[in-house]
Amino acid sequence: MKHVIMGDGGKAQGSISVFMTLIFGVILAVVTATFENVRFVTVDSYMMAAAEAAAMSVFGEYNQELYQEYGLFGYGGYEGHGVTELSKAFLDSVSYNLATRPEADDSSDIIQQRMDYTSLYRIGNVSNELSDIESLTNATVFYQQVEAYLKTQVIDDITEEIAGIYHNITKQGEQETIQQDLNTTSEYEHGNYEMPDEVGKDIEKDKDAAKDTGSSTTAEQAAGNPLETFRELLRDGVLNLVCDADQLSEETIEAAYTQPKQETVSSNKIGNSTADLLKDLLKDDEGIMADSFLDTTKEKGELICYAQQVLSQYTHRKEKTFQYGIEYLISGSAQERDNLLNVISRLFVIRTAINYAYVHADASLQAASLATATEIAGALGVPPLISAIQQTILIILSAEESCVDITALLEGKMVPIFKDATNFQMKYAEICGVSKAMFQKKAKKYSAGKGKWSAGSLNYQQYLWIFMLLVPEQQLRLRTCDLIQNDLQKRCNPTFSLEQCISGMRYQIGYDMPFLWSGLLPGGQENGIISKQTSGWYRYQ
């Protein structure tokens, strides 16, 4: 028979200890379960904090040359630094942020300190995968950074004002009439003009009409044959008349994102007639006198304003490889010289068209040109031919005035958009005595304007704005990328690639996390390890 030793209260001795052991076992299980739950609930936030800090740290190593020269943020872009390097640097930074112990060295004190650190999460096997890489050549990313660089609200207003001016200019165009008169004059100069069956009016009657209008003799008015002198004037082309062609940049643009034009702007051939030269010079292949091609989107306005601030142009040169960067955006030729020539040719078309609108309506110039044309036509005396030669003479006068205008524009002057008797520089008596020195002298009569807007006048920079509005947006953007990449390659690092400059990314991090109390594991977790993933994104703002 067993005997149970009873206490004073009649209870078995040790029962309370057993009971408390059971209670503490339950409490410990609840505490450890809660602890494990907190670890797994908070680990995502812990990992996200480490990843965000890592992204900020890695993208903080942006390309300094790109930012300093063009105000753009991008990671890498040189010596092959791209997605692979970004992924490795990001993963290293994440791992460093997750570390809970200082790096070990030979100091016993540091080793002792490491023993005092404990990792709550004990994260291991961290991996990383990047996706949705955003390059600076991406249109959306590029415009976001351009807009942040500009920080202005006046771009739309400026673009609308420029567009309005351009609409007014194109309304003054006389392109069709000009080409018809030049065709007739060209036939006469080549000896191919066919006289109509009925001449209509006698040549002497035309001479008398010229005298009645108050015009003097041809020698007093023109001092020669304008057709011959103008042809000789253009022996070396318009470029040599309006600037120092020997001092122009000879750089070549090796484009990466567009296909630059290799052909040069057609040059004048001495064997051509004066009318043929004028037809070639006034040929509107680019459609600049057709305002239906005008595109004024918000993105294009921002890009034009940005380009004006960071790229060089003929009148505002910066410390860049290419001195005519804006001109390249307009023309897209491989040679710098050709880009400037293309812009000057466009200016020549516009300025000649609007100058002709004035001289064509001026009675005194009409009378003087009629007398000269009558003398040139000679014995033929056909009114349609005389009229065509007369208008060609007026076109020559308009073209010479355009040379004055372009010379002034290239010197940074403000030139009136439309001309009248008060601001038209060329005199009819000077039509056969023009020279580069005369154009330069007359150009000095215009004021500089100090870069400000002037009612009724435009400077070279504002004409470039007009021409850029005529270029398709995508072409304008890709040519800008060409210039940025070429410039930084030649001045900073030959391996630079704008396409490799990363502006943003989406990341996905995978990692393993052990259970501290494997007895609480759910079924299937044999090794006491659970795999988790977290994701996020980062871009330059």
Image (cartoon, rainbow, N blue to C red):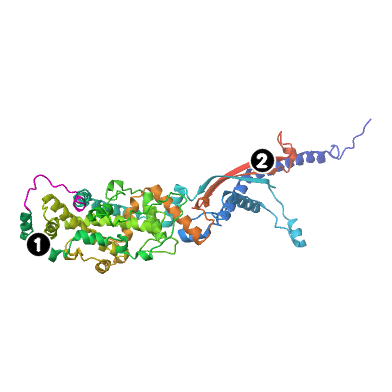
The crowding category of the residue bearing disc 1, from other C-alpha atoms within 10 Å (few below 14, some 14 to 19, many at least 20), is many
Q: Answer whether residue 518 is magenta in the image.
A: no
Q: Which mark is residue 465?
A: none
Residue nearest the viewer, comparing 500 with 398: 398
| Residue 110 picture location, percent across and down | 74, 60
Between 421 and 260, the one lying in front of the other is: 260
The verdict on residue 194 being magenta is yes
The residue under the point 90% across, 35% down is 4
Which of the 4 image quarters holds residue 449? bottom left
Front residue of 135/432: it is: 432
Residue 191 relative to residue 517: left or right: left
Q: Which residues are magenta?
A: 187-202
> Most extreme residue toward the top, as rendered?
1
Q: Position of residue 376 (x, y in %)?
A: 14, 57
Residue under label 1, please give it: 215
Give the residue type that dot 1 points to: Ser
Q: Position of residue 163 (x, y in %)?
A: 29, 52
Going from N to C along the chain, the mark reached first, 2 or 1, is 1
From the viewer's perspective, tell me whether residue 7 is left or right of residue 236.
right
Mark-to-mark CA distance, 2 and 1: 99 Å
Which residue is identified by label 2?
531
Position of residue 282 measured from the top left corner of the image (x, y, whole percent):
26, 53
Task: Give SS at disc 2.
Answer: strand
Q: Is residue 215 visible?
A: yes
